Image: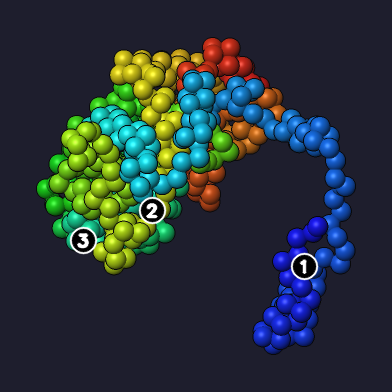
Amino acid sequence: MRYLPLTDPDRRAMLATIGVKNIDALFRDVPASAQLAKPVDLPFHQGELEVERVIMGFAAKNLSPATAPCFLGAGAYRHHIPASADHLIQRSEFLTSYTPYQPEISQGTLQYLFEFQTQVALITGMDVANASMYDGATSCAEAVLMAQRVTRRKKAVLSGGLHPHYRDATRTLDESAVLAPADPDGVEDLGALVDDTTACVVVQNPTLFGHVRDLRPLAAACHAKGALLVVAVAEIVSLGAITPPGEMGADIVVAEGQSLGVPLSFGGPYVGLFATREKFVRQMPGRLCGETVDADGRRGFVLTLSTREQHIRREKATSNICTNSGLCALAFCIHLTLLGEAGFAGLARLNHAKAGQLADKLAAVPGVTPLNKTFFNEFAVRLTKPAAAIVEALAAKGILGGVPVSRLYPGDTSLANVLLLAATETNTEADMDRLVAALKEVL
């Protein structure tokens, strides 16, 4: 029996109510050239095996980081994820769980969110973290709104080393944000842009171009004017080696947690991290999981300080964030737990060593000029030819040879020859040698 939700009398009644004679009249504003005169030419149905072969054929046309030497970065990084992380998040009690509004039946979910928050606070050097957000870019935008609430000021200064996606996401909420020029050489002085009207300065560390900065002078300049320092971290593994933002004076830390437990996945879903000082906690967006005791004195967990519009009046809400990216947060939590403190630091050291090895090899290639004095696992080089064309030539040789900065700054000809390259624990010396050999051929 076919499921027919509408009968002909139903359709006639709706058309009469709308005031048109037939369904075609509903499409009168669509140009005839854009309308189909006949059904789309699609193959007839096939069995599962046949469909699988067709789809695998399509997939085989892609150049995959799983099979090709991969030096991509710019905010999304390829790391090894323990098989146990993927296995655990697929347990039905995690995979099918919903927002934990009823704590009495959601203690497992609430506990791992509490542990997640604890981990984020520890590695960022901050007092308190929330139970995750959409991704790093939206966390950054929310941080600017929070800073404006805290300081009761409007002006936000965005670093030229901040990822353009983070800048763009922020500007959807605040078009007046002051954008510093792109900073491929890592020489900008943001302190000069801070005045008595500044709510916050947003800086990335390491920067989009890979530079690692001591943020203490900038934090002091911000605080002297009553402004907040927001630090964005696009590569969370860097915090295993670099001084945490909280120890350098950051007031709010936002980050992308994808590097731990979450695969590249063609751009998402990812997991946003957000941490701040305890004195600002009531202005923090998103959800916060807290520890408590029940009527019998037993340890328990609840959502607390809920200031989202789902819980209070919209005009008093600090955020309309309606997800906690819970499964990705769990994957992050599992991966970091498996690493432990020593393992996290060891992973960071390995990443930096790999990047240093790659940088040394590339510095010897004619036509490649390194731009970094400091970096973690990603750095920028200037080529003698447009980077986009070089990346395409490398792809033709089966190598994912980095991200041309022109993709992130379209129209800025001064950055046309700048290429970003990242090396992680997944890159072998043979991968690097293939890249070097190919670059020598195409430059």
Residue 422: give x, y in percent of width and height: 48, 27
Residue matched to label 1: 34
Mark on residue 321?
2
Q: Quadrant of the N terminus?
A: bottom right
Q: Quadrant of the C terminus?
A: top right
Residue matched to label 3: 153
Label 1 secondary element: helix
Question: In the displayed structure, does residue 221 sit left or right of residue 179?
Answer: left
Task: From the viewer's side, name the closer residue of 258 and 368.
Answer: 258
Residue 60: give x, y in percent of width and height: 74, 30
Q: Nearer the viewer, mark 3 or mark 1?
A: 1
Say what amino acid the circle numbered 1 marks: Ala
Task: From the viewer's side, name the closer residue of 429 and 314.
Answer: 314
- Whole-angstrom CA distance, mark 1 to mark 2, is 37 Å
Q: Residue at x 24, y 50 (%)?
A: 305
Q: Quadrant of residue 218?
A: top left
Say what amino acid the circle numbered 3 marks: Arg
Position of residue 364 relative to residue 148, above or below, is above
Position of residue 247 relative to residue 45, above or below, is above
